[in-house]
Image (cartoon, rainbow, N blue to C red):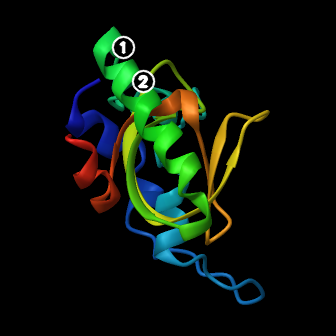
Amino acid sequence: MNETSAREKYRDIIDLPHHVSRTRPQMPVRDRAAQFSPFAALTGYGEVINESSRATDARQELSEDDLMELDIKQRYLLSILDQHPEITVTYFVPDEKKAGGSYAVKTGELVRIYGYERELGFGDGSRIRIDDIIDIQSTVFEGMGE
């Protein structure tokens, strides 16, 4: 059916004015357009894609020498713990949603070493697992021949 024959077929109604209800309000254009918005069949799929593309770091394995140096520093800190030395700790934070994680740095006053839990306790109440630590820096180590 071509355009001319379609026009002829509906000639009796094609030029009638658009009907406007007297009892019902007109739908806003924004709401009318929403009827034709795309349907998201896979709800949450975008978030999954974003999460999988988020980069994480692998946990760094320390050498025997690095582990020995950390052990020496921790023993020294234990011996001067009553002085509440200020230390800077670099440690691994495991990611809660996927393999890997990120590295963080914390500087603070060391107030306690929790031997059983294997954690360092800071003056602000935070704790860091000893097994996640890759480096400890402090001015108190300067006399140790670092």
Label 2: element kind: helix
Answer whether residue 58 is visible to the viewer in this image.
Answer: no
Instruction: Report the amino acid beneath label 1.
Output: Glu
Q: Nearer the viewer, residue 45 or 116?
A: 116
* Sooner in the amino-acid sequence: mark 1 or mark 2: 2
Residue highlighted by disc 1: 61
Judged from this view, the residue extending furthest toward the top is: 64
- Left or right, 108 with reference to 115: left
Mark 2 Cα-neighbour bin, 10 Å: few <14, some 14–19, many ≥20:
few
Q: Are marks 1 and 2 in contact (CB under 8 Å)?
A: no
Name the quadrant containing residue 39.
top right
Q: Is residue 143 visible?
A: yes
**Which mark is in front, 1 or 2?**
1
Q: Is 57 rendered above or below residue 124? A: above
Residue under label 2, please give it.
Answer: 52
**Hey, which quadrant is residue 124 in on the image?**
bottom right
Where does residue 106 sit, x and y in percent of width and height?
42, 57
Residue occupying image coordinates x 33% and y 37%: 6
